[in-house]
Amino acid sequence: MKLIMAVVQDKDSNRLSDALIENDFRATKLASTGGFLKAGNTTFLIGTEDAQVGKVLSIIRDNCKTREQLVAPISPMGGNADSYVPYPVEVQVGGATVFVLPVDQFEKF
């Protein structure tokens, strides 16, 4: 058995949740925050049999797409503000960061 932890952008969360349910996979959703952009994410915890890991990864891949987004850089705290240029920069957001972990035991009460 495996535990799949998938961190996805909030914009992809509902689409992924619907796709998992449609394919008969259950997941626990946790609200999380990204460190770089301080943007909202959703972390999915999905328990599944080893043989189903590929199918779950395919569902995640199909429903969590990367995209370009303009963001305003965070001003330096306590640093030299003379060289700070507050112009928006384009960064890649979205997609998914996925961890697949072995599970020794699973209980449901």
Image (cartoon, rainbow, N blue to C red):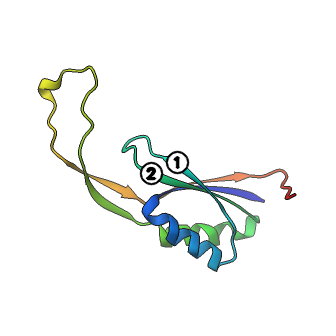
Q: Residue at x 57, y 75 (%)?
A: 19
Q: Quadrant of residue 38?
A: top left
Seen in the image, is 98 located left or right of residue 77? Answer: right
Q: Amino acid at mark 1?
A: Ser
Q: Are marks 2 and 1 in contact (CB under 8 Å)?
A: yes
Dot 1 surroundings within 10 Å: few (below 14), some, or many (20 or more)?
Answer: some
Where does label 1 land, which residue?
32
**Total numbered circles:** 2
**x, y percent for residue 68:** 29, 60
The quadrant of the picture occupied by the N terminus is bottom right
Whole-percent x, y for residue 95 in the image? 44, 60
- Residue at x-position 74% and y-position 52%: 102
* Distance Cα–Cα, label 2 vs label 1: 6 Å
In the drawing, does residue 79 fall left or right of residue 98? left
Dot 1 falls on a residue whose secondary structure is: strand
Q: Position of residue 2 (x, y in %)?
A: 73, 58
- Is tag 2's residue or tag 1's residue first in the polypeptide sequence? 1
Residue 58 in sight in this render: no
- Give the labeled residue for mark 2: 40
Instruction: Name the residue: 50% across, 64% down.
Output: 13
Q: Amino acid at mark 2?
A: Gly
The answer to whether one can see residue 101 in this image is yes
Badge 2 density bin: few <14, some 14–19, many ≥20, Cα 10 Å: some
Task: Farthest residue to the bottom: give it.
Answer: 22
Q: Quadrant of the C terminus?
A: bottom right
Q: Is residue 33 above or below residue 56?
A: above
Q: Measuring 64% from the left and 75% from the top, which residue is drawn there? A: 21
The quadrant holding residue 34 is top left
Query: Viewer-proximal residue, 31 or 96?
Result: 31
Q: Secondary structure at mark 2?
A: strand
In the image, residue 74 lies at what x, y percent? 27, 37
